[in-house]
Image (cartoon, rainbow, N blue to C red):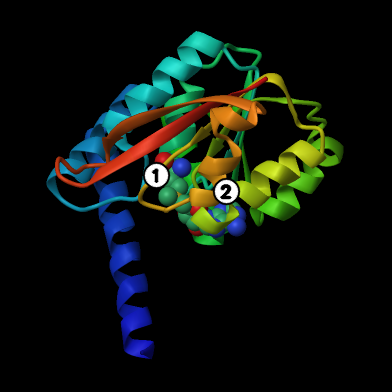
Amino acid sequence: MARGIYYRWWSHRARVESMLDFVYGNGEEGSPESVLKAVDKCGWNYSPLMCVGDVKGLILDNIVIHHKPKVVVELGGHFGYSAIRIARLLDEDAKLYSIEISPLCVAISRELIRFAGLSNKCTVVLSSSSKAIMELKEKYGIEHVDLLFIDHVGKLYLPDLRLMEEEGLIKRGSVVVADKVHYNFVVDYLAYTSNENRIYKSALHETYLQYSTKLRDAIQVSVHN
Ligand SMILES: C[S@@+](CC[C@H](N)C(=O)[O-])C[C@H]1O[C@@H](n2cnc3c(N)ncnc32)[C@H](O)[C@@H]1O
């Protein structure tokens, strides 16, 4: 058992370490596009990574381009790929808050975002999602969130969305994007955000799990009514 856990940790850390090595070797400092390209190359060719990836990333890109959010919050930042993906398309006066529970991921994420030249647009918050959500107003002066990207752990998709609502952070027109809704089996979340409930107008984008041409998955995009 202990050996299994150690092995998983080791393999995850080793994968992320080799990804970083590849990005520094192949990416260009100050160029978000080159960083994303290097991570994607790694994901497709060398090792499976947990980030949203380039295929689902295009769906995310279109949402950012279309809605032009000023305040973005993501739950589950991992090593910073989605933060870089979103932040590179944000206006100068817009800001992204990336909430991540793992100190190791936070350190890597801050460094990768710095390398991509996007530190001025991104704040990486080391915290559990629920604790951070309750501090967003007071600690970061956030009134409303224009775009919420949910990508942490399936069982928290719905409770954390409800917490965001209770905190008054979701307003009419706020866009909520949930990644891996099939993979994470978030039945309760999909039921709550379904069009029948009329709280959100939702659309499911059927696609594939990152860096896979076989494993199907979907992203749900919901706009608060
Ligand atoms: C799938 S990865 C996120 C990928 C990232 N959004 C991307 O596309 O680059 C999920 C991350 O959520 C983090 N996480 C898990 N539970 C969390 C929680 N309760 N609060 C904040 N982060 C959490 C994990 O440590 C992991 O790094």
User: In terms of secondary structure, where does tag 1 sit?
Assistant: loop
Residue 167: percent from the left, percent from the top? Answer: 82, 39
> What residue did someone put label 2 on?
157
Task: Left or right? Give the position of 135 relative to 95.
Answer: right
> Which corner quadrant of the image does residue 72 belong to?
top right
Which of the two residues, 29 or 106, is positioned nearer the viewer here?
106
| Horizontal and vertical percent position of residue 38 | 24, 35
Q: In this view, does 82 lie to the left or right of 140?
A: left
Where disc 2 sits, the SS reads: helix
Kind of residue at disc 2: Tyr
Residue, x 15% and y 44% (percent of image)? 214
Mark 2 Cβ inside 8 Å of ligand 1: no
Q: Which amino acid does label 1 sit on?
A: Lys
Looking at the picture, does residue 180 appear above or below residue 102? above
C-alpha gap between disc 1 and disc 2:
11 Å
The residue that label 1 is drawn on is 180
Residue closer to the observer: 168 or 109: 168
Residue 174's place in the image compared with 207, above or below, is above
